Amino acid sequence: MKGSGTPSLHAPRPTFEDQSWIAQQLGQADPGDARRARRAQQLALCLLAAPGCGLPKQTHTWGGLKAAYRLLHCEDVTRVKVMQPHGMQTLAAACAQPVTLFVQDTTERDFSALTHAEGFGPIGDNRGSGLFVHSLLALTPAGEVLGLAAQHTWARASRPPRKQTETRAQRQVRPAKESEVWPQLLETVGPVPSGQRWVSVGDRGSDSFDYGARPWPVTGTACRGSSPIAEPPTTATS
């Protein structure tokens, strides 16, 4: 494994189509250095070619694995910087559609095995440790995926203070409600362009006053439910 030119573990190699797509989606990413930008594209190719594998398999060589770790440990390389070009292209693709569905959902990333790692919070029944990832995916009504329009991650506080025992100082620094992520991602996407129809779709996790009371301006619609949408609703649901 330590021979930099020898594949450590076998995994699929990126195809030409993969390379073209990654270059199109991430080519304008600016992580602060041209070398980091190239490395980010190379790593994205490896992840795309073998999404079910770990980094050692995905990067193929010891040298590639070390380069990936250096990139991921760089403070200037953030998810927002790397994914910004893809998000902009996703919104551009949405503008080319008469109707676009923006589907939101939250998932948990379980890192309980990393017992000495920092920055995680409780997940599940509070016995596990990890992060929450809330994603906003853009699709056509026919189900074609346009891309990831926005995303937010956070760690839940280990022991949130009880309201009846909170001091004024604690209330001022208390984290925002997790349900606020639903309307916040819509605000991140921005207003609906003139002539477009964008539909925000969420499950019961979106059943909050803030989400229902702040529909997109112009022609935005909020829709909640667990059933697939065959046709976008004509009015906002409550």
Image: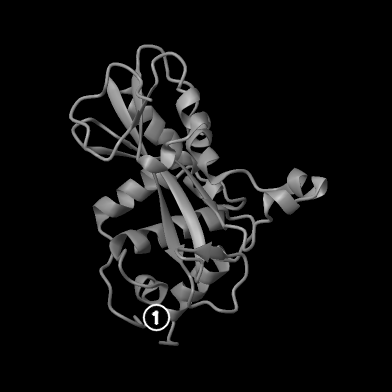
Compared across the picture, whether 61 is left or right of 144 comes to right
Q: Which residue lies under the disc numbered 1? A: 5
Q: Does residue 81 appear anywhere in the picture? A: yes
Nearest the viewer among 19 and 116 is 116
Compared across the picture, whether 97 is left or right of 29 comes to left
Nearest the viewer among 12 and 154 is 154
Compared across the picture, whether 131 is left or right of 203 comes to right
Q: Where 60 sits versus 231, above or below?
A: below
Q: Does residue 214 appear anywhere in the picture? A: no
- Quarter of the view holding residue 121: bottom right
Residue 14, position in %: x, y? 29, 61
Residue 76, position in %: x, y? 63, 55
Nearest the viewer among 23 and 51 is 51
Which residue occupies 50% across, 71% down?
127
Residue 118, position in %: x, y? 62, 70
Which residue occupies 69% across, 56% down?
161
Name the quarter where the N terminus is drawn. Answer: bottom left
